Image (cartoon, rainbow, N blue to C red):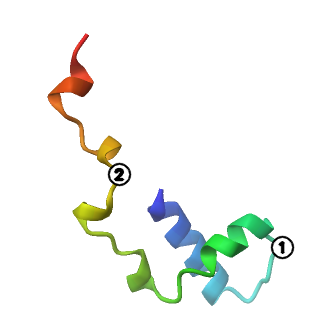
Amino acid sequence: QLYGLEKFWTFLKYSRQKPKINPKLEEILKNYKNLEDFRVDGASFPQQFFPTKSNYSN
């Protein structure tokens, strides 16, 4: 989900347009100051993103 957020943040940062956005989304975007802030290492992903054998059991 960070990919879309990163693209939207970039649009807002470099666009001459200043669209109104949802206040909750605006609060989230305040945490990101540059593109490197969107980089994520594997350790910070929630466990649900890493399938395990138990996730595939019937």
Q: Residue furthest right?
A: 20
Q: Amino acid at mark 2?
A: Pro
Measuring 32% from the left and 45% from the top, which residue is drawn there? 49
Measuring 42% from the left and 75% from the top, which residue is drawn there? 38
Query: Is 10 situated left or right of 16 in this image?
Result: left
Q: Quadrant of residue 44?
A: bottom left
Q: Amino acid at mark 1?
A: Lys
The residue labelled by disc 1 is 20
Given residues 40 and 17, the one toward you in this image is 40
x, y percent for residue 22: 79, 65
Q: Quadrant of residue 50?
A: top left
x, y percent for residue 14: 62, 88
- In primary-sequence order, the first of circles 1 and 2 is 1
Q: Secondary structure at mark 2?
A: loop
The residue labelled by disc 2 is 46
Given residues 18 and 42, the one toward you in this image is 42
Mark 1: give few (<14), some (14-19) or many (20+) Cα within 10 Å: few
